[in-house]
Image: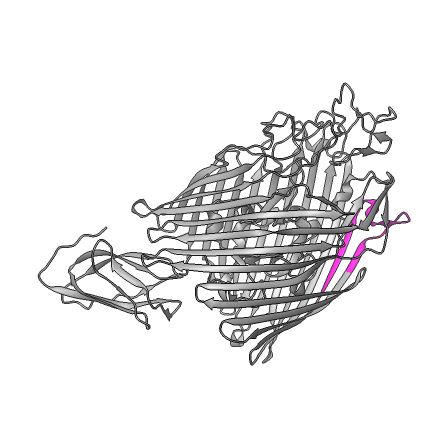
Amino acid sequence: MFNFGYAQEKTSLSGFVSSEKKEVSDARVFLIGTKYATQTDSLGKYSIENIPQGNYRIQITASGFQTLKKNITVKINENNILDFELSNTENQLNEVVVSGTLKAVKRLESAVPVEVYSPVFFKKNPTASIYEALQNVNGVRPQLNCGVCNTGDIHINGLEGPYTLVLIDGMPIVSSLSTVYGLSGIPNSLVERIEIVKGPASSLYGSEAVGGLINIITKNPTNAPVFSADVFSTSWLETNVDLGVKLNVGKKATALLGLNYFRYNQKIDNDGDNFTDVTLSDRISLFQKWTFNRKENRLFTIAARGVYEDRFGGDVRWEKKHRGGDEIYGESIYTKRAELIGSYQLPFQEKLMLSFSGNVHFQDSRYGTTSYIANQKIGFLQLTWDKKIGKNDLLTGIATRYNYYDDNTPATSKLGNNNPEKTWLPGVFIQDEITFTEKHKLLLGMRYDYNSFHGSILTPRLAYKWKLDDNNIIRLNAGTGFRVVNLFTEDHAALTGAREIVIANNLKPEQSINANLNYIKKINFNNGTFIGIETSFFHTRFSNKIVSDYDTDPNQIIYDNINGYAISQGISTNIDFNFPNGLKIITGASLLDNKNVENGRKETPFLTEKFTATWSVSYKIQAIDLNVDYTGNVYSPMQLPLLSALDPRASESPWYSLQNIQFTYSGLKNFEFYAGIKNLLNFLPKQNNPFLIARTNDPFDKNVRTSDGNTDNRDNYGLNDNFVPNGQTVDTTDNPYGLTFDTTYVYGPNQGIRSFFGLRYTLR
């Protein structure tokens, strides 16, 4: 740890400890392995006297900052003055966030609880997309919805994916159709941080922010490295390439160019059902973001992204020539997507910010013989005014959102003619954060939206923050959320083209009311150990939930609001440990209670866990520049969709855990080499099940018999009910369980244990 030769003469060591050009008081400064130690004063100054000449290893610890260790040399008759700069602790309690209030504010100062995750967190378990990376966030679970094409969404606190709003730089461009495949196309290399708000946020963000929101903040070109590369591959030959280049365009602008390429083309069938275990994918994403230097540091950023993906899942014998045919079953999806995002601060003395976004999403899909071709366009424009008046911090804004959706199903036809869905959603909102004292803040908000189909919608919001002291903070949040349901989504690919769309009543938008109590506790120990604890109690009640009825009439799909309500409630805790020896632990657990109540009957929704926990344990072996990261999660049983009383598959998932380990070597300048193992326990969802996908031997249901003895030759896309146009499916010698082809029985990734290896290069 240290090496010095004792001399008769003694000397001193002094200097300043700071962070972001601000002094750090009460920081502990000591020479490891000796008795020499002190603390910084109120100005961040320290001084250690009577030190023998020699080589030492100094350690500096302070509450809320990462522990700093450094080799130093102290000499006699010299001015030994050394200054040190500390960084915020990795738990990021002091991180600046914007998602809670649409304003940049330190997380501890925000009246709304916001969770923040940096690229450092996600590098502990490298993945090819944001969708996969979120599996390590407490209370957030990526949910696969199809065992063949691997479509998915993101659950927050057990709520289904449509209740989660996904933003990029605060813009609502990942929604509706694009959530099906758009999430898997967002590479980690673009991310500066991810902010998560659990609970309704419709008073600021409008529709879809019912259960919570995920805001993906992309990198600022000004702070980005000159060049970065991150390449990894797995033993399944999944290959991911991330490249980033910063360009200075004169003195006026800086640009960041990012390229992501992902390829997986192995038709692996380890579970023996003759279908691919994991969807094949060939995906490329090109991203460019510009920042412009303007007078008085006014903001102007603009970014664009293009994505193309060719995705396939199905029979391992499938080839392109089988696309759309009934000989060999396959699900083939071509996706083209373009996005534009920007923010421009208007040249006025008042702080006026104009934000805009637009995206075009085109999809050409074949699910067996069913063709699904869809086109969606979303435009968003918002103007905000930010003003401080005395103790009031005001934010007001107007926004409008336009959604265009068209497909080749009866969902967008009327009287035999094409009738695309066109929806306008203008709104106005106001928010006032009142600072009574340093310890007490009150936030009040209200939003009014007018939907061209549903009419007027009001969403109020209230938040109260009580800072007991620097180490104890209590927040109480309450508000409402709403979701204007897009009825015409990809679910209609299940249709034969003969069903009529019926809206039973004048549909009301889905609404929720939420209360959330949040408590943050910081514990600092004299030896430099830091513990941060954050606990939340939440309760959300949903009304007007819209459900689709396929059973009442086989020739219709009937839409109506639920005759009842839904509840989501529970407790969630995150704990961060930072030890002076370099050990860092981030762990969390959530206890959930979700139920639908209709006509007095309570039911737990499918694919909803009651308990989940996550962890990340990291330690750096300084002597050999090796980081060790052990990450994982655990999920309690979930109710699973069965097709009939004879279905032999388990009605509940087992307890299961996905665990990973990674080793990263950083001993070479600008380089990092990493390798590890994913799914250490080799968990597979087929365990204790005879099969996952029902009737892969007859995916076109050519040999399915119904109650009147007829053969059901309908097109099929994973329906999980037993009603067919000609009667009830019955068991036969060829079909002993009375099943139809079904892909919806899926709750976890269908990949076992596998290794990975990667390389990162960063030039700053």
The one nearer the camera, 260 or 49, is: 49
In this image, 200 relative to 563: left or right? left
Identity of the residue furthest to the front in this view: 600
**Residue 228 rendering spot, x and y as whole percentages:** 46, 52
Residue 266 in view in this figure: yes
Residue 192 in view in this figure: no
- Quadrant of the image for the C terminus? bottom left
In magenta segment, residue 409: yes
**Residue 476 rendering spot, x and y as whole percentages:** 58, 63
In this image, 759 relative to 145: left or right? left
Identity of the residue furthest to the top in this view: 733
Question: What range of the chain is rendered magenta?
Answer: 400-423
Using the image, determine if residue 628 lies above or below residue 478.
Answer: above
Using the image, determine if residue 106 lies above or below residue 237.
Answer: below
Quadrant location of residue 608? top right
The secondary structure making up most of the magenta span is strand
**Residue 502 rendering spot, x and y as whole percentages:** 86, 48
In magenta segment, residue 256: no
Using the image, determine if residue 100 lies above or below residue 725.
Answer: below
Identity of the residue furthest to the left in this view: 8
In this image, 462 relative to 736: left or right? left
The one nearer the camera, 184 or 686, is: 686
How is the structure coloured here? Answer: one colour
What's the residue at 73%, 43% (across, down)? 364
In this image, 349 relative to 499: left or right? left
The one nearer the camera, 406 or 69, is: 69
**Residue 451 rendering spot, x and y as whole percentages:** 78, 62
Using the image, determine if residue 248 lies above or below residue 117.
Answer: below
User: How many numbered marks have been drawn onto this rendered protein structure?
Assistant: 0
